[in-house]
Image (cartoon, rainbow, N blue to C red):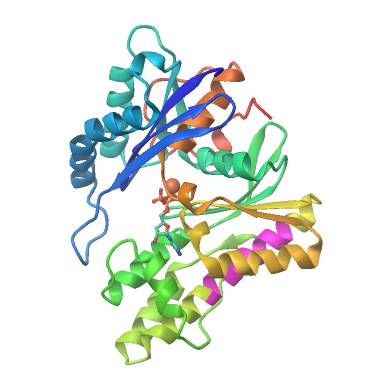
């Protein structure tokens, strides 16, 4: 085996550790998700405490899953941002402890890692990427050294929009999967639709959907309609980015990529335009350590240097991509 990288994810709710080989084989991937009390969003300090509590157990687990020891790791990668500072610190500290004795330590951008793990699985070379997760919604593609952002949310990410609506109707975090199953029995009611140029805005729609439920509208109908509206908006902008860039591949990635209805919409759009559609495997869609490990390998191999610091506000398009 050419090389082994241990990757650590800790940007928000999930603490994860993965081990990936230089050939791109995911050898182990374990995580544990902090769950805020019902009715609350993430409390950053509590999430950081959670991460400190689970990290040693997860490390033991990935090492025993692979039959390896820490000394077998050639590289340690950690997610340096964007994310919640208290959570990011736990990952950085842990990575520094584990890298020890001269083993290279690589800082990885969390959003780029969502893209690269999707690209590894799909083997696509140069897709238009729809990256949809909790805090982020971006339509990106590689142009001249970076993943350029062609469109993005102007307020909250699509996952947070779903989670916020879920909180309003009494669903536990993360609400995305629960809304997906409730939506199955629902019918369509029109909601505001908010695409501005190439950018998206979700929070007003969530406010309106929540208001309607409080006024007695059927929850299932609102779950269905919210999904239809938010996903159609994201699909519209992805289609336009595809037309502008004249590319012929689309990659759906990030936690919300696990949603069947979003997958279906994007697949239809791609078929109609003659583009190749691909989606990140569900087990690699949400935050995980394997995506950090794999991106760490790409960064390391490209000879790029990173700093051992957290970068809580680093944007996807701030990062030089030296491996493409
Ligand atoms: P970011 O990558 O922007 O920092 P994050 O790290 O919080 O965000 P991920 O773990 O990538 O997010 O994704 C979590 C989000 O995905 C949550 O908002 C959750 O509700 C949503 N999600 C998970 N499964 C589904 C699903 N089946 N349908 C819709 N949303 C889903
Ligand atoms: Fe994420």
Q: Residue at x 53, y 70 (%)?
A: 230
Q: Position of residue 114 (x, y in %)?
A: 52, 43
83 shown above or below 130: above
41 shown above or below 299: below
Ligand 1: image quarter: bottom left
Q: Residue at x 80, y 63 (%)?
A: 273
154 shown above or below 264: above
Magenta: predominant secondary structure element?
helix
Q: In the image, is residue 293 part of the stretch drawn in magenta?
A: no
Q: Position of residue 154 (x, y in %)?
A: 50, 58
Q: Residue at x 60, y 29 (%)?
A: 320
Q: Position of residue 287 (x, y in %)?
A: 41, 45
Q: Quadrant of the C terminus?
A: top right
User: How many numbered marks have been drawn onto this rendered protein structure?
Assistant: 0
- 149 and 64: which is toward the camera: 64
Is 52 on the left-hand or right-hand side of 246?
left
> Taking the image as drawn, is residue 196 in sight?
no
Q: Residue at x 38, y 90 (%)?
A: 218
Which corner quadrant of the image does residue 169 belong to? bottom left
- 203 and 213: which is toward the camera: 213
- 14 and 110: which is toward the camera: 14
Which corner quadrant of the image does residue 84 belong to? top left
Q: Position of residue 289 (x, y in %)?
A: 41, 36
> Taking the image as drawn, is residue 74 in sight?
yes
The span picked out in magenta is 228-241
Q: Residue furthest top?
A: 101
- 63 and 85: which is toward the camera: 63
Q: In the image, is residue 231 part of the stretch drawn in magenta?
A: yes
């Amino acid at each position: 085996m050419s090389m082994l990288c241990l990757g650590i994810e800790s940007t928000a709710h999930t603490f994860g550790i993965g081990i990936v080989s230089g050939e791109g084989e995911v050898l182990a991937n374990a995580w544990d998700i902090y769950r805020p009390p019902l009715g609350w969003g993430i409390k950053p300090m509590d999430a950081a405490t959670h991460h400190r509590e689970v990290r040693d157990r997860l490390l033991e687990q990935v090492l025993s899953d692979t039959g390896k020891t820490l000394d077998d790791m050639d590289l340690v990668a950690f997610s340096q941002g964007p994310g919640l500072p208290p959570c990011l610190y736990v990952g950085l500290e842990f990575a520094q402890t584990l890298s020890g004795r001269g083993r290279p330590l690589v800082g990885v951008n969390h959003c780029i890692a969502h893209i690269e793990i999707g690209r590894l699985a799909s083997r696509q070379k140069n897709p238009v990427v729809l990256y949809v997760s909790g805090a982020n919604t971006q339509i990106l593609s590689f142009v001249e050294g970076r993943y350029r952002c062609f469109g993005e949310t102007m307020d909250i990410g699509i996952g947070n929009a779903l989670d916020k609506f879920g909180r309003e109707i009494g669903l536990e975090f993360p609400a995305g999967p629960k809304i997906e199953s409730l939506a199955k029995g629902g019918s369509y009611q029109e909601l505001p639709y908010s695409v501005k140029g190439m950018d998206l805005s979700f929070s007003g729609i969530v406010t309106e959907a929540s208001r309607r439920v409080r006024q007695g509208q059927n929850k299932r109908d609102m779950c269905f309609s919210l999904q239809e509206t938010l996903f159609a908006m994201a699909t519209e902008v992805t289609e336009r980015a595809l037309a502008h860039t004249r590319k012929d591949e689309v990659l759906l990635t990030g936690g919300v990529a696990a949603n069947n209805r979003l997958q279906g919409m994007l697949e239809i759009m791609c078929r109609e335009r003659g583009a190749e559609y691909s989606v990140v495997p569900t087990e690699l869609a949400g935050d995980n350590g394997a995506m950090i490990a794999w991106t760490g390998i790409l960064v390391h191999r490209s000879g790029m240097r990173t700093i051992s610091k957290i970068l809580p506000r680093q944007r996807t398009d701030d990062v030089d991509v030296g491996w493409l």
